[in-house]
Image (spheres, rainbow, N blue to C red):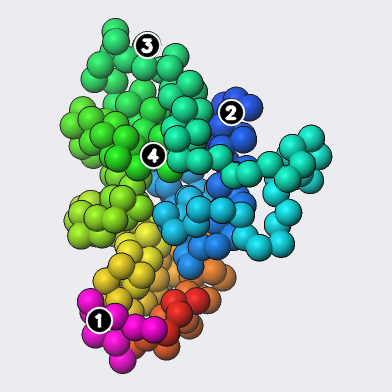
Amino acid sequence: MAQSNGTNTTSQNWTSTQAYIMAVISLLVGCAVGYLLRGSATSAPAPTQQAQQAPAGMGGMGGGMGGGMGQQQMPTPEQLKAMADKQAAPLLEQLKSKPNDPALLAQIGNMYYDAQQFPTSIEYYTKSLAANPSDANVRTDLGTSYFYANQPDKAIEELDKVVKDHPDHANALFDRGIVKWQAKMDAKGAIEDWQKLLKTNPNWEGAEKVKMYIAQAQKHMNIKPGQKSDKPAM
């Protein structure tokens, strides 16, 4: 498990809006090639930038949300942003009197991250780290936000900082491996990260998934980093 810090408050005190957002994300992640983990909340997969609708055969939101939503369409990015704005409003009000509170800034970042508003989550995670640069979980969140914002080099830069200071940080190692594999086609580097994760965190809850990813990445060992490939990652 990742190290815990103050940002866990968000995941422990969900409102109906947050629950709805994460239900949507749970459907979207069905199309994922792989997913990254927030440093402060490992229980729910992060959303994928590639997925824009529910996987074929999911049949809308009906059963999972109590049967009252029928064949309702997935929310658009604009609708997700509106929900995140509404959810974050009370915290943004608090921020007026505590503009440099790192935990508060990280909570707001988490809300926008969960709503797939990654440029905004980057903004608040960056502000949080300016006030508390040693927070490894928030820096992991910043790195994953950069990945989903199509900035893999910045993602790796932030995750490198986490691993340098916390060599056994499971989520950072997992996420860096995903970024290396999917964005940089660096299968060797990804495998090294995941093997280190398993060595330093043998009882990590995602160990079986990591082993599966290692097996898949080994099929790409002949591809040079940065090289395009038609072979699927999964």
Residue 97 shows up from this direction: yes
Residue 227, numbered circle: 1
Return the residue found at the far bottom: 222
Binning the other alpha carbons within 10 Å of mark 3 as few (below 14), some (14 to 19) or many (20 upward) gives few
Query: Is residue 141 covered in magenta?
Result: no
The CA distance from mark 3 to mark 4 is 19 Å
Q: Tags 2 and 4 in contact by the CB under 8 Å rule?
A: no
The residue shown at (43%, 24%) is: 85
Sequence-first disc among 3 and 4? 3
Q: Nearer the viewer, residue 12 or 54?
A: 54
Residue 140 shows up from this direction: no
The CA distance from mark 3 to mark 1 is 47 Å
Q: Secondary structure at mark 1?
A: loop
Residue 93, numbered circle: 3
**Callout 2, which amino acid?**
Thr
The residue shown at (39%, 74%) is: 195
The image shows residue 219 at horizontal and vertical percentages of: 42, 88
Question: Which residue carries the number 2 mark?
Answer: 17
Sequence-first disc among 1 and 2? 2
The CA distance from mark 1 to mark 4 is 29 Å
